[in-house]
Amino acid sequence: MTDDDAAPLARPASCTELFTAFTALALQGFGGVLAVAQRVLCEDRRWLSKAEFLEMLALAQVLPGPNVCNLSLMVGDRWFGTRGAFAALAGMMAVPLLIVLAAIALYAQFASHPLVAGALRGMGAVAAGMIVGTAVKLAGPLRASPLGLPVVALLGGACFAAVALLRWPLVWVLLGLGLLACGLAWRRLAPSAERGA
């Protein structure tokens, strides 16, 4: 039994709780909400297990639009249907939209200042570190993947090489490696499904 399974999952009390939780989540995630989303949804609120978070995140990443917005729609829909989906998405978007509009106005005034340019480069490094940290935290549930850890690591490495090093378009990498991963998983799961039938 892992620490992920130690306590039962909770449920948001209302659409209002979804809205406020996703607003708070969005306001914590300057430069990278994904790392914060995993901590808030899996560890703090316990609305999702790490495995469920990974499944929803995988789907959110192949759908058009921002990953965390897609994730908020799925989490909201899971608990309260369409109303919950809209409440969670509104929480992700409303206050951050106002902040971004204010930041755009300030950036237009001070964009050429060297301190502003340096600060933005530093924030890029912080955001990259948050993404790497989240990947490390979520690696545990991947051990239970039907593909096995070596194949998962190989696919992850191939994806990194194709996007970061070869600079291939993300949509083609997702289609190619995603379809390959789905095919491999289907081949491994099909015999066990037949035995269970």
Image: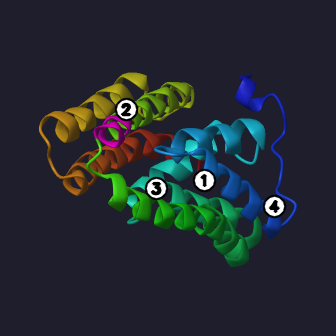
Which segment did they paint magenta?
114-119
Disc nearest the viewer among 1 and 3: 1
- First-in-chain label (2 vs 3): 3
Find the distance from the CA under tag 4 to the CA under tag 3: 21 Å
Disc nearest the viewer among 1 and 4: 1
- First-in-chain label (1 vs 2): 1
- Check disc 4 and report its element: helix, strand or loop: helix
From the viewer's perspective, is 62 left or right of 189? left
Percent of width and height locating residue 75: 66, 59
Residue wearing tag 3: 67
Percent of width and height locating residue 80: 76, 70
**Which residue is more in the foreground, 67 or 78?**
67
From the viewer's perspective, is 167 left or right of 124? left
Q: Please, what is the three-letter code of the amino acid marked with disc 3?
A: Asn
Residue wearing tag 4: 17
Quadrant including the N terminus: top right
